[in-house]
Image (cartoon, rainbow, N blue to C red):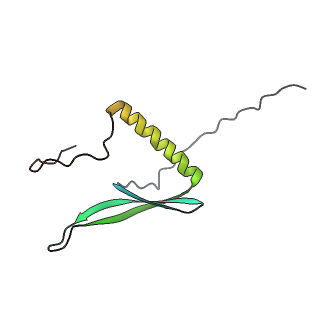
């Protein structure tokens, strides 16, 4: 009896971007079931009507639904990308201080 290593077969990955749409999102809303994670991506848009209190409208542009294994892979991939970014450019401040009154917004 001989120990035989299974042969490894290379698989080519082809990425089809012909039906892809690119959108920008500054907000995400998540919900879940025991089987899936649901993520709504969209834009928070402040609205101010005269005489009314300020309102923020969350305009959903895309919904992504995935199983929990896919969600974990996504979390790991995003975590790795954020670590690499911060190693190169410094820590990302997710709660920046508002600009001082009278200071124009940054062009960044």
Instruction: State the image coordinates of residue 61 (x, y, percent, origin top left).
Output: 38, 62
Instruction: Tell me the residue at 60%/39% (across/down).
Output: 12
Residue 39 appears in the figure:
yes
Q: Residue furthest top?
A: 2
Instruction: Tell me the residue at 32%/33% (across/down).
Output: 89
Instruction: Tell me the residue at 18%/73% (across/down).
Output: 52
| Nearest to the observer: residue 52 or residue 107 | 52
Q: Residue furthest left?
A: 102
Instruction: State the image coordinates of residue 93 (x, y, percent, origin top left).
Output: 30, 42
For this view, does 6 lie left or right of residue 93?
Answer: right
| Nearest to the observer: residue 61 or residue 98 | 98
Where is residue 40, by image quadrant? bottom left
Image: 50 above or below 90: below
Image: 73 above or below 37: above
Where is residue 60, by image quadrant? bottom left
Instruction: Tell me the residue at 14%/74% (across/down).
Output: 51
| Nearest to the observer: residue 68 or residue 64 | 68
Q: How many marks?
A: 0
Image: 39 above or below 92: below
| Nearest to the observer: residue 18 or residue 107 | 107
For this view, does 33 lie left or right of residue 101?
Answer: right
Q: Residue furthest bottom?
A: 51
- Please identify the quadrant where the N terminus is shown: top right
- Please identify the quadrant where the C terminus is shown: top left
Residue 15 appears in the figure:
no
Instruction: State the image coordinates of residue 106 (x, y, percent, origin top left).
Output: 18, 45
Image: 100 above or below 35: above
For this view, does 75 lie left or right of residue 34?
Answer: left
């Amino acid at each position: 009896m001989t120990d035989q290593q299974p042969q490894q077969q290379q698989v080519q990955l082809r990425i089809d971007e012909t039906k892809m749409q690119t959108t920008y999102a500054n907000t995400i809303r998540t919900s879940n079931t025991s089987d899936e994670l649901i993520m709504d991506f969209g834009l928070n848009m402040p609205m101010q009507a005269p005489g009314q209190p300020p309102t923020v409208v969350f305009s959903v542009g895309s919904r992504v639904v995935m199983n929990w294994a896919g969600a974990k892979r996504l979390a790991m991939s995003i975590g790795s990308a954020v670590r690499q970014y911060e190693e190169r450019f410094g820590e990302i401040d997710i709660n920046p201080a508002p600009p001082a009154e009278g200071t124009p917004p940054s062009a960044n």
